Amino acid sequence: MYIRNSSKALIISGGKLLLNRCCSRTGEYYALPGGGQRPKETLEEALIREVREETGYTVKPLRLGALYERISLSKEEMTGHKLYFVFVCELEGTCAVHPSETDPCQTGTEWVPLDGIEYVNLYPLVIRAEIRRILDAADCLFLGSERRTF
């Protein structure tokens, strides 16, 4: 199992946060747009491509806001190791094209009010808890590491 880099976008417009609405076996949840980095692709290139594919919007990364690590383990072996690079972004233009490649669990994209975001089922939960701090910080925050056993 290798480490997977994932570029995620915090995009705020008009007091709302752009999120992917998702559904899995555990129910409905939200996730930041973005995804996995491909070979020979920078984190920023991955971010721009993934946000465009999933939401139809074009973004400009302003700064790296946070880093978070998650290791998933079954009782026998490691099943995943992911580094989340969370970028604070702005929209480039106001028009979105139709999403071209959504994630398998993704059912849509929504602008969710930032006020009350602490009550939204946003995954990973550590990002939900730290959104305001990420937006307000001048430097990149390390949100910690998590090991989950299934």
Image: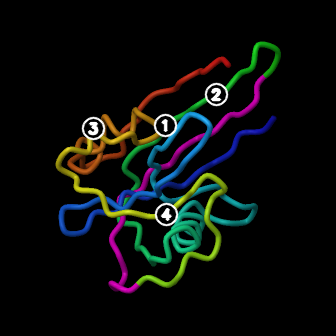
Name the residue beneath numbered marker 1.
Answer: 68
The local secondary structure at tag 1 comes to strand
Residue with the mark numbered 3: 119
Q: 10 Å neighbourhood of mark 3: few (<14), some, or many (≥20)?
A: few
The percent coordinates of residue 73 (x first, y second) are 71, 22
Q: Residues within 10 Å of mark 1 (few under 14, many from 20)?
A: some
Distance CA(mark 4)–CA(mark 1): 25 Å
Prevailing secondary structure of the magenta residues: strand
Magenta stretch holds residue 37: no
Q: Which residue is mark 2?
A: 71
Q: Nearer the viewer, mark 4 or mark 2?
A: 4
User: In terms of image quadrants, where is residue 75?
Assistant: top right
Q: Decide: few, some or many residues near mark 4? Use Cα within 10 Å; few <14, some 14-19, many ≥20.
A: some
Q: Position of residue 125 (x, y in %)?
A: 41, 34
Residue at mark 4? 108
Sequence-wise, which precedes: disc 3 or disc 2?
A: 2
Residue that protrudes farthest toward the top in the picture: 75
Q: Give the mark, 3 or 1, whose residue is nearer the N terminus.
A: 1
Element assignment for label 2: strand
Secondary structure, mark 3, is helix
Give the residue at x 43% y 58%: 9
Using the numbered discs, state the Cα–Cα distance from disc 1 to disc 2 in whole angstroms.
10 Å
Marking on residue 50: none
Range covered by the magenta-colored residues: 78-95
Give amino acid for label 2.
Ile
Colour option used:
rainbow
